[in-house]
Amino acid sequence: MVKYMTNLQSLFNIQGQTVVITGGSGELGKPMAHALAQLGAQIAIVSLHAASSSKVAAAIQAEGGHAIGIACDVLDKSALEQALAQVSAAFGPVDILINAAGGNKPQATTSADRTFFDLDSHAAESVFALNFTGTFLGCQV
C-alpha cells in the first residue's frame, strides 16, 4: 500500500503550483485552499470581499503556506482580468483553477410554501449568473 501512495503523491504533486480559487473564502473554497496550501501550492483566494479573502490568505500564511487574497466580482470580466494580473505578478502563471464561487437565494428555491411556479425569476437569474456565468467567465480569463 505504501508503494501505491508514494506513486500517487508523485503523480499528483502540486508543490509550487499556482492555484486560483474563486469563492476561496466560502464554505467549499476555504477548506480546499487550506488543504492545497498544505500540499505546497501557492494559493490565490479570489472572493467578492477583500476582508474575507485576506483573512483566509493570512490564515494560510500563518500555517506556513503561500497565499494572497484578491477582491473580485466573478461576474465582471475586467475585474477577473485584473485579478489574473495580480496572481501572475505574485506567483507566475496559473496552473489550477477551482471555480468555487456560487450560491443560492431563498426566492429561487422551492419549499413547502413555494412551488416552482412561484419562484422569483430575478432571483433565479441572479443564481444562474453567479453559478454559471461566474464559472464561464473565470474559465475564459
Image (cartoon, helix red, strand yellow):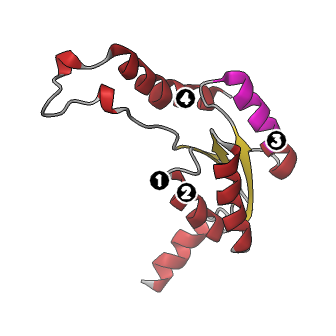
- What's the CA distance linking mark 2 and mark 4? 18 Å
Q: Is residue 105 positioned above or below 124 on the image?
A: below
Dot 2 crowding, Cα within 10 Å, few <14, some 14–19, many 20+:
many
- Write down the residue under mark 4: 134
Q: Label for residue 30?
A: 2
- What's the CA distance linking mark 2 and mark 1? 6 Å
Q: Secondary structure at mark 3?
A: helix
Q: Secondary structure at mark 4?
A: helix
Dot 4 crowding, Cα within 10 Å, few <14, some 14–19, many 20+:
many
Callout 1 amino acid:
Glu
Q: What is the number of callouts on the image?
A: 4
| Residue 97 lies in the magenta-colored region | no
- Write down the residue under mark 3: 86
Specify start and end residues of the magenta stretch as a single range.
76-86
- In the image, 3 versus 98, the foreground residue is 98
Callout 3 amino acid:
Gln
Among numbered discs 1 and 3, the one appearing first in the sequence: 1
| Residue 81 lies in the magenta-colored region | yes
Name the residue furthest left. Answer: 112
Q: Quadrant of residue 120?
A: top left
Q: Secondary structure at mark 1?
A: loop
Callout 2 amino acid:
Lys
Among numbered discs 3 and 4, the one appearing first in the sequence: 3
Q: Are marks 1 and 3 in contact (CB under 8 Å)?
A: no
- In the image, 114 versus 64, the foreground residue is 114
> Measured from the top left, where is residue 128 in percent x and y?
42, 24
Please name the residue shown 82% across and 41% down the image.
86
> Measured from the top left, where is residue 73 in percent x and y?
64, 31
- Write down the residue under mark 1: 27
Please name the residue shown 82% across and 36% down the image.
85
- What's the CA distance linking mark 3 and mark 4? 19 Å
> Measured from the top left, where is residue 35 in percent x and y?
56, 66
